[in-house]
Amino acid sequence: MIMDSVGTLSPFNSPTVKLDRLFGTPRVEVFAKLDLLQLSGSTKERTAGSLVDAFMRSGQLQAGGMVVESTSGNLGIALSRQCVVRGIKFVAVVDENANKSALEIMRAYGAEVDLVLDPPDGNKLAARRRRVAQLLADNPGAVTTNQYGSPHNPEAHYSTTMPEIMEAMDGRLDMLFVATSTTGTLLGCQQYVREHGLATELVAVDALGSVLFGGDSGNRRLPGLGAGIVPALALQSEPDRVCRIPEIQMVRGCRRLARREGILAGASTGAIVSAMDQLLPEIPDGSRIAFLVHDSGVPYLQSVYNDDWVRDNLGEEPELDTSQSLEDSSVR
Ligand SMILES: Cc1ncc(COP(=O)(O)O)c(C=O)c1O
């Protein structure tokens, strides 16, 4: 199914809902944009659509063509879907660390998964890049989408994510919280805010251990947010604030959102919940704040939502208060 727009909004339009129970205070209005409802399950549905469409518009890619990308995460799943509905072959280049269920989803959409075995020098990233280059050379006309540097990544969020949020919020938004990896989502929202002269403050929510925005490299286990190398797009991203969230707080943020609002989200959204909780005391009364629910929690059932995994891997109790009830005013 190629989704054609039937109204003035984009075909990717997802609901924006008001959350009264998350922080239990009437002081600040909190809204969530439910991108976990995208057909491929994440915000990357928008990014993948924009990246593939740009190639098709330019004539570099047609039905019957091939897209090659080094990805084993949400972008790979989204590209699998976006390519299948356009009659394009998609090859995902992955390494042995790739999440097995993500690979199964890509295969279910008809994508080819190209597994690169661990190279003798241990540099998996370089090995995947070499394999992408080889596939491009072997398949004339094949393209690679370059989500880390392509302007069509932020373009997706400039032209769909941010206009949808502003429409849903009647044009009144004081703060927007976005998790960051390529920083494409944030950058597209930033471009929209600047071009429309909005006063909306943009908060980048990053993982502790990510090198984005001057962060120090460290061990990270949960996928979705953060980066090990500064991507080209990040050089243009200028959030008003950056919050760096440790993984245990992502876990607690996720569980709080599930228990209080019935929204089962992934780690990056848990990080956002934790960041909002931290900043809440400084946010002026009457403010309207929004955040993206970037993906679903189902792929995280064996990590974020598994008590043993949390104890074994993060060395902490998953929740300080097992009920995460409204009386518990902190996720920290
Ligand atoms: C789970 C998740 N977290 C965060 C993001 C934001 O990532 P980026 O900075 O690459 O736009 C996305 C984007 O789709 C995502 O799927």
Image: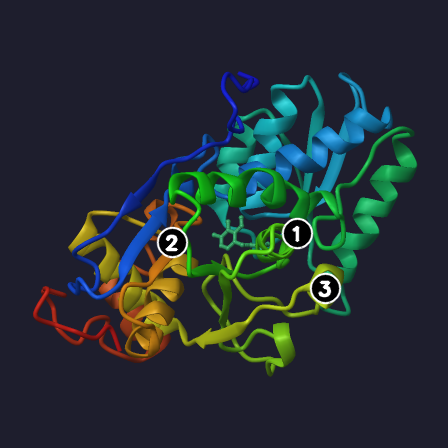
Q: Mark 2 CB in 8 Å range of ligand 1?
A: yes
Q: Residues within 10 Å of mark 3 (few under 14, many from 20)?
A: few
Q: Amino acid at mark 2?
A: Gly
Question: Secondary structure beneath disc 1?
Answer: helix
Give the residue number, with chain letter if any, for mark 1: 195
The x, y position of residue 198, in whole percent, is 54, 56
Marks 1 and 3 close (CB-CB < 8 Å): no
Q: CA distance from mark 2 to mark 1?
A: 31 Å
Give the residue number, with chain letter if any, for mark 2: 266
Q: CA distance from mark 1 to mark 3?
A: 15 Å
Query: Which residue is painted at 42% across and 47% down in the image?
Result: 295
Left or right of 184: which side holds 271?
A: left
Residue 246 versus residue 47 in the image, above or below: below
Specify whether residue 258 is in view.
yes
What mark, if any, has residue 89 been given in the picture?
none
Left or right of 222: which side holds 191?
A: right
What mark, if any, has residue 236 been given in the picture?
3
Q: Nearer the viewer, residue 250 or 106?
A: 250
The x, y position of residue 65, in whole percent, is 79, 23
